[in-house]
Image (spheres, rainbow, N blue to C red):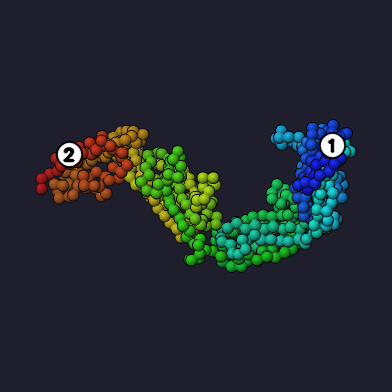
């Protein structure tokens, strides 16, 4: 309810109140005084009411009065950054435990003068309630479950509550969060816990215990893992795909993405129905990575409207031969296994050491370097292969193309004109040196 008073005339309006005052109240105010009461409707005895008054100077003594409160309430001036936003006072008094249901007047006073008015409504108390937030049905292993105990009732005491169940290795302690969504209920205690990934299907007893460990309330929790036919059994996965940081996930490619040895690439994974708890354990592995990559859920605005997606940066090993390397993501408790391939360009230090080329990995990563390295490696084998050919051997290494040059060494070389010329020279030399049958 909102009231505007000008020269002692009162006009009913919306929620809150605005008054123009005279006398001592006017000396403490810069203009109209605004009061906003959050929770002004349907308060239970013992609940907190948020009172916010603006327009009164910080040095003034501001108090709130109502028969719903045990005593007058002193409001404190804004502090910190809130003080910079505007002059105001604030308090969160509790409705008296003995207050009966009904409507109570609320007045704000400065220097003995009423500067704002409102109404406060009180509803009947209700008995303590223990709630298990299980989504209204069975919960999956790895899913989070909430426990709440509301014992805001005259005469209730104690703050040490816990939940015990065969599901959990230890009691789950319930606490009150004054900054949470139940700030107005000082006797709302809660906790959220993740069900063990190995929890077996079944119905489990959950017991709420009080300060001395004695049982207060019982509840039931149904656990059932996803089964064939369930929409979340294997989900609808896409990936792994790869992208660079400037390009972003919108340009991720599942195949054909190139990255230099020693470079970094981002791995992207999408799943329409991720397994509960998968946000904390999804990884991508590859022999090309320095270490397994933790894929973290993308909670940015860019992910809105899309399937849940996960990504993480992977560092490519420096001493790595060029080629196509598998990247694997396993999800849904091993039921889903998908593999993509990442093209690594440039010769690593190991390849350079074997060929005797003497160049570092950075040089090998330049355009055409992989082809030149392959040519050098072929030169080193030419004499041996010629002898093997004369002795009846094929002279070709496993995994080589028709020229005997390793296919992996040519993938992603970025040869262009220079690379093609070098490769052509290799092929010509091969034909010229091949011994006659």
Q: Which residue is mark 2?
A: 429
Q: Specify the quadrant of the image occupied by residue 166.
A: bottom right
Task: Determine the residue located farthest toward the left in the rendered image.
Answer: 437
Residue 74 seen in the figure? no
Nearer to me, 57 or 217:
57
Q: Is residue 88 left or right of residue 325?
A: right
The kind of secondary structure element at disc 2 is: helix
Foreground label between 2 and 1: 1
Nearer to me, 437 or 110:
110
| First reached walking from the N terminus: tag 2 or tag 1 | 1
Residue in the picture at 55% in, 55% down:
277
Nearer to me, 354 or 175:
175
Q: How many marks?
A: 2
Residue in the picture at 69% in, 61% down:
131
Residue 400 seen in the figure? yes
Which label was assigned to residue 310? Answer: none
121 w.r.t. 204: above or below: above
Q: Is residue 227 left or right of residue 61?
A: left
Q: Residues within 10 Å of mark 1 (few under 14, many from 20)?
A: many
Residue 341, percent from left and from top = 37, 49
185 w.r.t. 26: above or below: below
Residue 227, percent from left and from top = 50, 65
Task: Determine the residue located farthest toward the bottom in the rendered image.
Answer: 202
Disc 2 from disc 1: Cα separation: 102 Å
Which label was assigned to residue 21? Answer: 1
Residue 27, percent from left and from top = 84, 31
The kind of secondary structure element at disc 1 is: loop
């Amino acid at each position: 309810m909102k009231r505007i008073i000008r020269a002692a005339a009162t006009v009913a309006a919306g929620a809150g109140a605005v008054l123009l005052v005279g006398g001592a109240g006017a000396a403490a105010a810069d203009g109209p005084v605004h009061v906003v009461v959050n929770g002004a409707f349907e308060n239970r005895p013992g609940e907190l009411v948020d009172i916010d008054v603006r327009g009164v100077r910080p040095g003034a003594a501001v108090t709130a009065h109502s028969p719903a409160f045990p005593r007058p309430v002193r409001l404190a001036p804004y502090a910190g950054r809130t003080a910079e936003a505007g002059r105001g006072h604030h308090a969160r008094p509790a409705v008296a435990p003995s207050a009966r249901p009904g409507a109570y007047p609320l007045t704000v006073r400065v220097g003995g003068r009423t500067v704002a008015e409102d109404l406060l409504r009180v509803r009947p108390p209700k008995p303590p309630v223990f709630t298990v937030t299980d989504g209204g049905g069975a919960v999956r292993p790895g899913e989070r479950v909430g426990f709440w105990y509301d014992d805001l009732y005259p005469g209730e005491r104690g703050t040490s509550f816990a939940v015990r169940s065969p599901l959990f290795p230890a009691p789950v302690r319930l606490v009150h969060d004054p900054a949470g969504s139940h700030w107005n209920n000082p006797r709302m205690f809660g906790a959220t816990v993740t069900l063990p990934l190995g929890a077996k299907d079944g119905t489990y007893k959950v017991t709420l215990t009080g300060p001395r460990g004695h049982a207060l309330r019982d509840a039931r929790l149904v656990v059932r893992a996803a089964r064939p036919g369930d929409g979340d059994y294997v989900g609808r996965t896409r990936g792994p795909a790869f992208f660079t940081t400037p390009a972003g996930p919108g340009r991720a490619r599942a195949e054909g993405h190139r990255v230099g040895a020693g470079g970094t690439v981002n791995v992207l994974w999408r799943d329409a129905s991720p397994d509960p708890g998968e946000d904390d354990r999804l990884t991508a592995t590859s022999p090309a990575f320095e270490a397994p990559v933790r894929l973290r859920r993308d909670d940015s605005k860019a992910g809105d409207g899309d399937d849940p997606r996960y990504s993480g940066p992977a560092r490519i090993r420096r001493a790595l031969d060029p080629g196509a390397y598998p990247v694997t993501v396993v999800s849904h408790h091993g039921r889903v296994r998908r593999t993509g391939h990442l093209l690594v360009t440039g010769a690593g230090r190991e390849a350079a050491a074997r060929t005797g080329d003497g160049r570092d990995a950075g040089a090998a990563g330049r355009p055409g370097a992989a082809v030149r390295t392959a040519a050098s490696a072929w030169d080193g084998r030419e004499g041996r292969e010629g002898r093997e050919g004369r002795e009846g051997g094929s002279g070709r290494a496993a995994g080589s193309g028709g020229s005997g040059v390793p296919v992996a060494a040519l993938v992603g070389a970025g040869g262009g004109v220079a690379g093609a010329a070098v490769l052509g020279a290799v092929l010509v030399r091969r034909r010229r040196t091949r011994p006659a049958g």
